[in-house]
Image: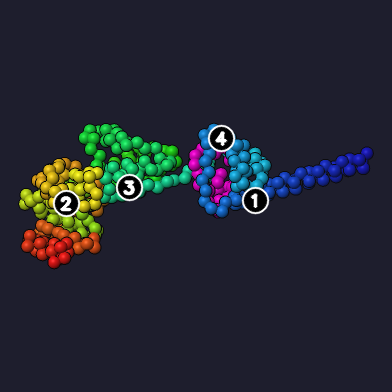
Amino acid sequence: MKKFLIGMLGTGFTLLTVVAVGGYWGYQTLTMFAQSQLNVEHAQELEIKRGTSFSQFTNILTQKKLIEDGRKLKWLVRLHPELAHIKSGLYEIDPQETVNSLLDKLIAGDEKSFALTLLEGQTVKEWQLQLAEQQKLKFDDGLFNSILLKNGDESALPEGKFFPDTYHYRANSSANTLLQESYRKMQAELEKAWENRQKDLPFKSSYELLILASIIEKETGKASERPWIAAVFINRLRKGMRLQTDPTVIYGMGERYQGNITRKDLREQTAFNTYRINGLPPTPIAAPSLAALHAAANPADVDYLYFVSRNDGSHVFSKTLLEHNRAVNKYQRNR
C-alpha cells in the first residue's frame, strides 16, 4: 500500500511537471508570437468593417497571409481577453508591424490618417475640385455655404473665408469637419490681424482687410515683398487711386480666362475689374495666407505707388509714374 501511494504521488508529480512545462512552453510560444512581425514587405491598408468578430478578424489576417497560424492568435486572445476589443476602421500596416503593435492600434482605434493641403492663393472653386477628387472623403459643393450658415454668416459668399493649411481626416469621414476647422481658423487669424493692425488704415471692416490680403496673395511671388505690395495698394487707396491689379481682372473673367489678359479685358466693366472700379472688389479673390493677412494689417512704411514684375517672382517698386514706365519698358516691353 505504501509503495502504491508513493507511486501515485510520483505519477501525480510527473503529470504536474508535464503540465507546468507544457503551460510554460505554450505561454512562451504565444509571447513570442505576439512579438513576431507580420508578413508585410510594404505598407498596406487593412479595413476592419463594423461588426467584425475577433474570429473573423483572425481569418482576415490568415487569408491575407499576414500571419501563418491563426490558432495562435485565437489562443492569445483567450489568454488575454482584453485583446478582443478591436475597433472597426481603416488602418495602415507598416513593414515593422508586430502582432502586438497591430492589436494595440486596433484596440485604440488608431486609424490611418489622410492629409489634405488647401493651398493659399487658390479659389473656393479650385478647392471644391480638389475635395471632390479625394476618394475617401465625403464632400459636396454646397458644403462651403452650409458651413457659413451654421456659423451665422448669411452672406453665402465663401471666397477667402477658409484658411489654407494641411488638414487631416480618416477614411469615409465628411469634409465638414476639416472645413469647419478651416473656417474657424481663418476667422480667428483675421480677428487677430484686425486687432493688431496699424492705425488709420483705409479699411471699414476686417472683411475689407481680408479682401486686400487676397489680392496681396495673388500678386506676391517673393514672400519678403508682401509688406511692400501691401503698402502700394494701401497708398493708392489713401490717395483715391484705382488699384489696377490684374488678378482681380482675371477673377472677374471667370472661366473665360485662358491665360492672357487683353486690353478689351482691362476695359470690361465687372464688379472685380480694379481698372474700372474704385476701391476694393466686393469679395476676396482667393484664400490669403497668414503672411498676406499680416501684410495687409501691417504694410511696410514706404511711399511706393507702383510695381512691375521682373519676371523672376520679384518686382521693381516705384514712387512715380515716370519711374514705373521706365521699369515697365525695361522688364515688360524689353526696350
Q: Compute the Cα span from label 4 to label 2.
A: 62 Å
- Image quarter where the N terminus lies is top right
Image position of 150 with respect to 198: above or below: above
Magenta residues (range): 83-103
Tell which tag, 3 or 1, sits nearer the viewer: 3
Question: Of the residues tagged 4 and 3, which is closer to the observer?
Answer: 3
Per the model, the C-alpha gap separating discs 4 and 3 is: 35 Å
| Above or below, comparing residue 68 to residue 56 in the picture | below
Mark 1 lies on a secondary structure that is helix
Please report whichever mark, 4 or 2, sits nearer to the chain's N-terminal start. 4
Amino acid at pointer 3: Leu
Amino acid type of the residue tagged 4 in the rendering: Thr
Q: Which disc is residue 52 wearing?
A: 4
User: Would you call the spot at circle 2 few (<14 residues within 10 Å), some (14-19), or many (20 or more)?
Assistant: few
- Judge by depth and name the residue closer to the eye, 188 or 204: 204
Closest to the observer, 75 or 134:
134
Is label 3 in a helix, a strand or a loop? loop
Q: CA distance from mark 4 to mark 1?
A: 26 Å
Q: What residue did someone put label 3 on? A: 118
Say few, some or many: other residues with alpha carbon within 10 Å of mark 3 (under 14 / 14 to 19 / 20 or more).
many
